[in-house]
Amino acid sequence: MVTDHVLALPDMSKPFVVETDASNFELGGILMQDGHPVAFKSRKLKDVERRYSVHEKELLAAVHCLRLWRHYLLGSPFVVKTDNTAVSHFMTQPKLTSRQARWQELLSEFYFVLEYRAGSSNYVADPLSRRADLASLGSVAALSSSAVATSIRDRRASYYRKIQQHRA
C-alpha cells in the first residue's frame, strides 16, 4: 500500500483482510489483499447510531463493511482487524442485545477471524472514520464534493507516507 495510487483488482484466489474503525461521528473500513487496497468505505453515523456504545460503533463498522463487500468475502476465509478488544471476542460473547444478536446472525454467514489491532497500529482504517470536515461541521445538509474529495486525497496521501515510513 506504500506506493498505490489506484485500487488493486481483487484476486479471488488470495485471502482478504478487512480493517475497520469507528469514531463518534463516522465509521470506515478498507478491504485489502497482500497489503494493497481493493476498496475503501467511509460514512457518517446516523443520529441514532451516534448514541451506540463505543463497542457497538466498532461492531457496526465491521458489519457495515462485511455487508458491503459480501460478494468478495463469502465462501473464503478472511481476517477482520479492529482496534477494539471487545469486538475481537464478539462471536463468543455470551450475552447479546437484540441488535448484537442480529449482527451475530449476519456475521455467521462468513468464515473469518476477528483480530485485535492496537489503535496506534490502525493507521489504515483510522483516517476513514475521523474525517475532520464532518467532525467540525456536525450536522450539515450539504458539503462541496470537490472540497471533500481534496481533503480525503490529502489525508490518504499523508497516511500513505506514514505507512511507507513504518515499513522502512
Image: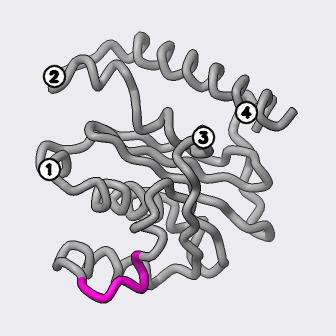
Q: Spatial distance from mark 3 to mark 1, Cα to Cα?
A: 25 Å
Q: Spatial distance from mark 2 to mark 1, Cα to Cα?
A: 20 Å
The number of discs equals: 4
For badge 1, the amino acid type reads Arg
For badge 4, the amino acid type reads Ile
Q: Spatial distance from mark 1 to mark 4, Cα to Cα?
A: 32 Å
Q: Spatial distance from mark 2 to mark 3, Cα to Cα?
A: 28 Å
Residue drawn 33% across the image and 59% down it: 60
Picture quadrant of residue 165? top right
For badge 2, the amino acid type reads Ala
Range covered by the magenta-colored residues: 90-95
Q: Which tag is nearer the camera, tag 2 or tag 3?
A: 3
Residue under pointer 1:
51
Q: Position of residue 22 (x, y in %)?
A: 38, 46
- Label 2: which secondary element: loop
Q: Is residue 20 left or right of residue 139?
A: right
Picture quadrant of residue 71? bottom right
Residue under pointer 2:
141
Q: Position of residue 102 (x, y in %)?
A: 26, 78
Q: Is residue 104 left or right of residue 6?
A: left
Residue lying farthest to the right in this orientation: 168
Considering depth in this image, is 85 or 39 the residue closer to the camera? 85
Q: Position of residue 106 (x, y in %)?
A: 37, 78
